[in-house]
Image (spheres, rainbow, N blue to C red):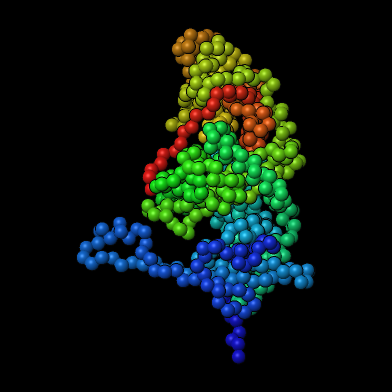
Amino acid sequence: MTTAAVSKAMSLSLRLMRATRTVETSLRKDHELTEVDAENGRLFIGQGPAAAPSWLPFVGEFAVGRPLRLRNRSCGAVLFLKIEAEGHPGVTRTMALTFGTGHHALEADAFERGFGLRVVLNAVARSNLRGIDVATLDATTFLKRVQASRDADLEGFKIDFERDLVRLAAGSPKDTTFARSLAGKDMLTLHSKTSSSDVREKCRKALTLYESRDYKADFGFIDFVAPVQDKALIETLDGLAFAEIQSLAQGGSSDLHLALPEILDPEEGVEIGYYGIGLKPGAKPSFSQVMIDDYVDELQGGRLNDIADMAALRSSHEVRVIRNGELDKKQKRKLYDCLVFEVDHHGSIYVLFGGEWFSVDKKFYAAIEKSFARLVSPVPFVASTTATNERDFIAELNSRTDLLNMDQVKISPEGMPGASFEPCDFLSTKRQFIHLKDGHASDLISHLWNQGIVASESFVRDGKFRKEFRDNAIVRQRKYRKAGFEKLLPSGRSRPDASQFTVVFGILRLRYRRSGALGIPFFSKVSLRAAADRIALMGFNVELHLVEKQAKLGKAPSAKKAA
């Protein structure tokens, strides 16, 4: 007589296998799980061997008397279930439920990307969100987690619908019989009362929600940047990204960079290393962060010709975590998953992030390009420069009589001691506040937009800021033997007419290698539009001046040490 299954509160971790995969090809080749007999599914389990923790030798040096004998043991399981799609008799999909360390045995590419996120957005009302992870794509990628203390509306999470790529969402579903709470990215985590007898029904519900389009009512903005499904197109885009990597390894330039696609625990002190065919042989250096310069160093010191194409790189190159001086065998990710690249292919914009290609919605793209075209000045204050960096460019501009160097003048607004802001890099006789940035340096281009916003707000609102701006202009005139610039600025007592001034963003850029055009990355255009709108609301005119950079880029690798 079979004992009836008892429901109990627990968390389930679900992944949806790609239709082209089998159970065997969904498991890593080096997995150490053993298959055991199972009813209505395939079950793999594993018990890790006892092993001393990596920190034991250090702690052991403080122990007096007998040596310390501490051991860690881990265990895990993966259960594969075939689930019949609702409304499609005979059509099945395979789901993998993981327990303990079982997820380490899975091949990430074998499962549908964004499965968990799509389920959550279809199941949870916008008013019942608990947390959202986003990636803000730019020259440096920012990963942000916004978490509410209780269910809250989407508006409270302050998502920038144009710039932020939603990576994970959590909340309370409308159907509480399905789960008490959900969280999802690629994997779906559901917290519910369940048992072995009803787990299939929960998997079927998750599959139905994944295929739904209900999310478009409240979360349609996620389709501004949507996953690419066409395999042939993905191969073409991979080829373009691989060409960029080859160019970097040969000393060229590119906007391609690296970013870990998930948030790391800031309390864990870890380093990373690059491993794979064709990389620099010998003792591996370790690094404090993922940086394209460091990875390129490893390529240049190795055998680049051994890496035939992106498929070879994707299957071999890894970023591995080094914890307490030792490799953490379970904490590794494909380097491909860390690549961030934006490319214009046949008039469409594609972005590689988190191991997946995304296409930018054409209407969204057209709207951004239209606003960008309005901001770009057809006649920049300087057309081109041979300066190798921003500092040299500033020195070059010093000789012009129509520009006053205000670089590194620091002013603290009223009530904000220590919060020193630059009013601008140069003040022109045309009443232009010129803010400069080397667009190929490691700093964020969007940081320049923020500088312009802060300086503009301070100029309009703060009499102390305006007075010190004018006073410093007089000092700089004497230093550079120029005159008349202080007359362009109002005194601290009088409120300025912002319409008389123009905020100019001057960016040094190399022409794009493929198109030969002079521009900035698409997501920098997105953030520029928001910044320009904010500054224009204060009454200022806003312009972008693109200065062609002709000199070859230098490189500033991050500090590293031998592992």
Residue 500 versus residue 333 in the image, above or below: above
Residue at point 44% right, 38% down? 558
Residue 444 versus residue 268 in the image, above or below: above
Residue 437 versus residue 2 in the image, above or below: above
Q: Position of residue 283 (x, y in %)?
A: 39, 47
Q: Is residue 62 visible?
A: yes
Residue 426 versus residue 123 in the image, above or below: above
Residue sitting nearer the eye, 489 or 552: 552
Residue at point 37% right, 52% down? 325
Q: Position of residue 353 (x, y in %)?
A: 61, 47
Q: Position of residue 386 (x, y in %)?
A: 55, 20
Q: If the image is split into quadrants, where does the N terminus sit?
A: bottom right
Q: Quadrant of residue 504?
A: top right
Q: Position of residue 4 (x, y in %)?
A: 61, 84
Position of residue 185 in the picture relative to residue 411 (left or right): right
Residue at point 58% right, 55% down? 131
Residue at point 71% right, 29% down? 373
Residue sitting nearer the eye, 490 or 381: 381
- Give the residue at the far bottom of this rendering: 1
Residue sitting nearer the eye, 76 or 32: 32
Q: Is residue 406 visible?
A: no
Q: How many marks?
A: 0
- Give the residue at the far left of this rendering: 65
Residue sitting nearer the eye, 399 or 39: 39
